[in-house]
């Protein structure tokens, strides 16, 4: 028994004490190394091929120029979320940008201010001038050609910061007084008006019988008037055009169906004729299965031609038009005489057909029907002088931009929420007001090789830097201990 106790004291106890000592040293080195890494505030290591967790050089250059204080409020996010990781890098580049993680239930004041509920996942980007709210669903888009999800988080966040710090907001007016779709809470264009407002624009209504054209009107939206303009209103709109005005005109065909000779809309057609276009009285339907939604000929998925308006959705999605008409464009000689250039960018397939007499059998093609393709959306640029142009974006459908409800199978939805309907309208306003996104950054999630969170980054750093250092220290300690024992 005494020999056993002596053995424990002289052999096992001494070796166990040394083992505990070495474990304590290793643990202390790990804690010290981790503390040093935190204090160094090293940027997260991004091993993703698309650099999902790293700001691009383009964003960095733009963010450095921001001079106003900007607060980014993250509702429903965690510290490891891609958007939060990127937001912290904005702060590292420019200390005027601050990141806040918000619990809507704990901060009802902020939730109320930005219209956020406890179940929402949203980012509110705010400056002393204005704010913009981005829903989590807006951080991604979808490529219909490759079937891959595309991350546009950086694009959305960077442009939101730039939007809320610009010197002035564009002034957008919806024309009223002719039965147009309105923007009040119970009107068809309410959702669209709210979305345009959220894109950092001032949105108002304009009745030209009661007031003159505003001194600053960056974009005039005419959404389906159902009665003609007066001579006075027509004169004011003509003056606006001659001063380089920008117009979005959305028109459904129904109004013209009630006017056999189209004479009740002489002033409307007079304004449209300045650009060499007119809207049809009839309805366009599709026969191509790939150009209709849910097998419904009246729900047209048109073909898009690449330009500044559709560039963000050209390969990532499509729009859906609901009982559209067609746009009639003058011949090349007439357009030349008007100093107008026409660029169609929304069209049907060649299989589409057009019928002027809309009746119950409209969805079945007849031998007498006109065959496609037809223009549904067109950019018309009128040269006023060497320094001045006026632009009309004409779209032969208005319902697709409204918050009316339609039945698709078992689902009730609004046209504006179908596919990319809202995007193409917001892009149109941005194009006309020279407010297109300053940067365009798209990261394909389909080719990601490794996605690291912020906590995983720290672990990787510890492994890369800490383990080799630890091995070296342990080796030195063991060597010194052996030398002393051998003396």
Image (cartoon, rainbow, N blue to C red):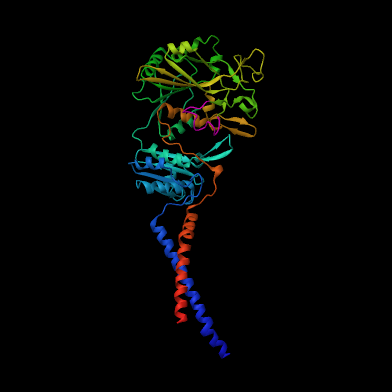
Residue 467, relative to residue 222: is it above or below?
A: below
Which residue: 64% across, 18% down?
A: 362
Image quarter (top left, top right, bottom left or bottom right) of the C terminus: bottom left
Q: Is residue 284 visible?
A: yes
Q: In the displayed structure, does residue 419 sit left or right of residue 27?
A: right
Q: Nearer the viewer, residue 249 or 377?
A: 377
Residue 102 screen position, x and y as percent: 44, 49
Which residue: 53% across, 83% down?
A: 11
Residue 487, relative to residue 378: is it above or below?
A: below
Q: Nearer the viewer, residue 52 or 75?
A: 52
Residue 431 screen position, x and y as percent: 43, 28
Residue 183 screen position, x and y as percent: 46, 28
Q: Nearer the viewer, residue 392 or 407?
A: 392
Which residue: 62% across, 31% down?
A: 408
Q: Nearer the viewer, residue 231 or 325?
A: 325
| Magenta-colored span | 305-318
Q: Specify the principal SS of the magenta part.
A: loop
Residue 74 screen position, x and y as percent: 45, 46
Is residue 423 rendered magenta in the image? no
Residue ranking furthest to the bottom: 2
Image quarter (top left, top right, bottom left or bottom right) of the N terminus: bottom right
């Amino acid at each position: 028994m005494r020999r056993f106790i002596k053995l424990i004291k002289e052999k096992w106890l001494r070796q166990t004490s040394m083992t505990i000592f070495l474990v304590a040293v290793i643990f202390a080195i790990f804690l010290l190394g981790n503390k040093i890494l935190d204090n160094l505030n090293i940027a997260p290591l991004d091993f993703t091929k698309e650099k999902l967790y790293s700001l691009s050089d383009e964003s960095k250059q733009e963010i450095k120029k921001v001079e106003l204080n900007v607060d980014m409020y993250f509702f429903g996010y965690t510290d490891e979320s891609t958007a939060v990781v990127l937001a912290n890098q904005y702060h590292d580049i420019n200390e005027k940008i601050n990141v806040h993680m918000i619990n809507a239930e704990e901060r009802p004041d902020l939730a109320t201010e930005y219209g956020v509920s406890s179940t929402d996942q949203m980012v509110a980007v705010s400056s002393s001038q204005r704010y913009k709210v981005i829903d989590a669903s807006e951080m991604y888009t979808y490529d219909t050609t490759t079937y891959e999800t595309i991350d546009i988080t950086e694009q959305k966040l960077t442009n939101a910061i730039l939007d809320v710090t610009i010197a002035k907001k564009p002034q957008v007016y919806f024309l009223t007084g002719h039965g147009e779709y309105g923007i009040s809470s119970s009107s068809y264009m309410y959702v669209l008006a709210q979305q345009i407002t959220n894109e950092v624009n001032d949105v108002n209504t304009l009745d030209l019988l009661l007031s003159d054209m505003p001194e600053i009107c960056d974009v005039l939206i005419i959404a389906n008037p159902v009665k003609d303009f007066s001579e006075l209103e027509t004169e004011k709109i003509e003056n606006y055009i001659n001063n380089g005005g920008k117009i979005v005109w959305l028109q459904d065909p129904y109004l013209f169906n009630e006017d056999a000779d189209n004479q009740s809309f002489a002033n409307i057609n007079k304004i449209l004729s300045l650009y060499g276009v007119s809207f049809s009285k009839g309805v366009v339907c599709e026969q191509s299965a790939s150009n209709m939604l849910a097998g419904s000929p009246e729900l047209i998925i048109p073909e898009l031609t690449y330009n500044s308006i559709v560039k963000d959705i050209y390969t990532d999605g499509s729009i859906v038009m609901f009982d559209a008409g067609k746009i009639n464009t003058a011949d090349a000689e007439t357009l030349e005489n008007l100093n107008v250039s026409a660029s169609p960018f929304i069209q049907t397939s060649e299989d589409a057909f057009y019928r002027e007499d809309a009746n119950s059998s409209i969805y079945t093609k007849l031998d007498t029907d006109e065959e496609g393709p037809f223009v549904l959306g067109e950019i018309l640029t009128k040269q006023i002088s060497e320094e001045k142009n006026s632009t009309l974006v004409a779209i032969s459908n208005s319902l697709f931009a409204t918050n009316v409800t339609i039945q698709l199978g078992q689902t009730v939805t609004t046209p504006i929420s179908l596919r990319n309907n809202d995007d193409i309208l917001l892009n149109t306003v941005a194009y006309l007001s020279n407010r297109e996104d300053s940067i365009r950054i798209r990261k394909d999630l389909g080719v990601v090789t490794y996605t690291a969170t912020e906590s995983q980054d720290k672990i990787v750093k510890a492994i890369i830097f800490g383990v080799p250092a630890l091995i070296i220290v342990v080796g030195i300690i063991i060597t010194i201990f052996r030398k002393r024992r051998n003396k």
